[in-house]
Image (cartoon, rainbow, N blue to C red):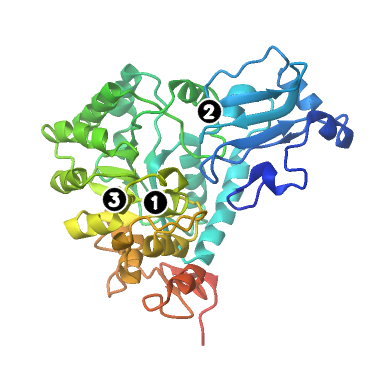
């Protein structure tokens, strides 16, 4: 496992007594005959740069020597004064590029390991009160197969709404896939109340070299479950137009690029009813008021991951006060009437932490508040995390509110989350969690 403080692995080598990664010679003394790789954490868990290290046998098996060079930007093979690799590899990107690029001999996650991990993760999520998940930036075919494997055996206790992470390498392949291979994902998709697959993910931007490495390593996806993809603004628009032609609901990450994404979607909306088809703009970070108004006019759905942009928002420390209020703009979306929801993005996976982040808007290192006027009430935050997400999976008439005729998905809490102070809200854990009226965590109080 990575070096750092779990579950996010912040700190990296700074948490060690030596304040540095071990060298290959030090690992050699511990394991002279066996290959060793202490992996870097997934960049989205913590914050880049992340650090991995191999011993001499690990370097040899992966053919890394003084002449080796990384094939993508952002990866550094650390060398000593003689130009020899120390064993340390620094990954300055968030994507798992080092494993794809330099480490073909490192064992990959297999199907059975992912299935076992999914079962373990469901228990962890249920223990935080989660009854449904939605993966908007896509699942690779192998990941979808893992979900289907558990679903077919009645072992999927978490309602899961998945989006296809495409494997195409060109626009020509995209046409073929949308026309011939993804008909099952058109419209509201295919599935039942426990597993539904609908729509495709289309990336705006990204590194083409990392995307190519990711495709070449399939079915392995590294720590993530999706295929790394990349597209230029022109390619993004063409892919959106294709998705409109073939009635495939499009999902994309806005991140720091909301304005160009909105610009493209306006043109697409002139030809296709993207609002009616529930296209989704995800992970909004910095924003402008005019773009939020445009999202309302487009009728698209919006998702936020507040912990990423607020709690882990040190990179936005320079924002002016007015711009800080529009970072992960939950309050503004609510006031505009944009159909919005919020999620954990698994960093961390506790929804009450995400609620706390929306209520406080506090950055973890400096304790800076990103726009006090943009803070949400407990009720607003919890609504974005619960009822707000039902439209993403076409289930707003069957789940969300606890009323007669809706799914019996609920948690039993030790105190009222609506009146809890911020610290108490973040620390809340359910005594019991139910999905479809069945207990999936804890015990019901007498």
- The answer to whether residue 189 is left or right of residue 446 is left
Q: Between disc 2 and disc 1, whose residue precedes?
A: 2
Q: Residue 269, image x and y in percent?
A: 14, 36
**In terms of image quadrants, where is residue 419?**
bottom left
- Residue drawn 28% across and 74% down? 403
Q: Residue 266, image x and y in percent?
A: 16, 35
Q: Marks 2 and 1, Cα distance to the nearest angstrom? A: 27 Å
User: Quick one: which residue is furthest to the bottom in this view?
Assistant: 446
Of circles 2 and 1, the one toward us is 1
Q: Marks 2 and 3, Cα distance to the nearest angstrom? A: 38 Å
- Residue drawn 29% across and 56% down? 330
Of circles 2 and 3, the one toward us is 3
Q: Marks 3 and 1, Cα distance to the nearest angstrom? A: 14 Å
Q: Nearer the viewer, residue 411 or 180?
A: 411
Q: Nearer the viewer, residue 170 or 338?
A: 338
**In terms of image quadrants, where is residue 434?**
bottom left
Residue 379 - label: none
Res 122 seen here: yes
Q: Residue 297, image x and y in percent?
A: 13, 46
Vertical placement of residue 4 versus 212, above or below: below
Q: Between disc 2 and disc 3, whose residue precedes?
A: 2
Q: Between disc 3 and disc 1, whose residue precedes?
A: 1
Res 399 seen here: no
Vertical placement of residue 379 versus 139, above or below: below
- Is there a contact, CB below 8 Å, between mark 3 and mark 1? no
The residue carrying mark 2 is 218
- The answer to whether residue 300 is left or right of residue 17 is left
User: Quick one: which residue is furthest to the top in this view?
Assistant: 67
The residue carrying mark 1 is 305
The residue carrying mark 3 is 326
Q: Nearer the viewer, residue 407 or 74?
A: 74
């Amino acid at each position: 496992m990575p070096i750092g403080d779990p579950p996010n692995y912040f700190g990296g080598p700074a948490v060690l007594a030596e304040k540095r990664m071990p060298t290959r010679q030090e690992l050699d003394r511990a394991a002279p005959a066996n290959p060793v790789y202490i992996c870097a954490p997934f960049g989205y868990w913590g914050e880049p740069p992340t650090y991995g290290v191999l011993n001499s046998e690990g370097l040899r098996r992966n053919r890394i020597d003084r002449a080796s060079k990384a094939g993508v930007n952002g990866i550094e093979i650390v060398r000593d004064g003689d130009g020899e690799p120390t064993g340390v590899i620094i990954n300055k990107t968030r994507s798992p590029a080092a494993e794809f690029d330099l480490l073909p001999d490192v064992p990959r996650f297999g199907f059975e390991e992912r299935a076992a991990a999914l079962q373990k993760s469901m228990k962890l999520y249920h223990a935080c009160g989660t009854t449904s998940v939605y993966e908007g930036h896509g699942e690779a075919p192998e990941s979808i197969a893992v979900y289907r494997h558990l679903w077919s055996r009645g072992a999927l206790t978490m309602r899961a709404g998945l989006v296809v992470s495409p494997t195409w390498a060109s626009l020509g392949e995209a046409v073929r896939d949308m026309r011939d291979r993804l008909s099952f994902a058109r419209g509201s998709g295919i599935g039942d109340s426990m597993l539904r697959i609908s729509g495709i993910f289309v990336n705006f931007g990204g590194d083409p070299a990392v995307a190519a490495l990711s495709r070449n390593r399939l079915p392995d996806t590294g720590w993530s479950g999706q295929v790394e993809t990349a597209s230029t603004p022109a390619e993004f628009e063409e892919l959106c137009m294709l998705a409109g032609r073939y009635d495939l609901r499009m999902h994309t990450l806005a991140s720091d690029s909301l304005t160009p994404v909105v610009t493209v979607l306006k043109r697409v909306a002139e030809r296709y009813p993207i609002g009616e088809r529930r296209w989704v703009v995800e992970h909004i970070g910095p924003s402008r008021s005019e773009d939020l108004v445009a999202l309302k006019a487009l009728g698209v759905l919006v998702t936020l991951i507040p912990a990423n942009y607020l709690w882990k928002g040190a990179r936005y420390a320079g924002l002016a006060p007015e711009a800080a209020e529009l970072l992960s703009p939950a309050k503004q979306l609510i006031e505009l009437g944009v159909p919005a929801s919020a999620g954990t993005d698994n960093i961390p996976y506790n929804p009450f932490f995400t609620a706390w982040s929306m209520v406080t808007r506090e950055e973890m290192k400096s304790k800076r508040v990103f726009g006090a006027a943009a803070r949400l009430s407990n009720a607003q935050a919890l609504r974005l995390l619960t009822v707000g997400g039902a439209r993403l999976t076409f289930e707003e008439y069957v789940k969300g509110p606890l009323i007669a005729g809706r799914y019996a998905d609920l948690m039993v809490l030790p105190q009222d989350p609506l009146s809890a102070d911020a610290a108490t809200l973040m620390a809340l854990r359910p005594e019991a969690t139910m999905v479809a009226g069945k207990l999936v965590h804890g015990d019901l109080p007498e």
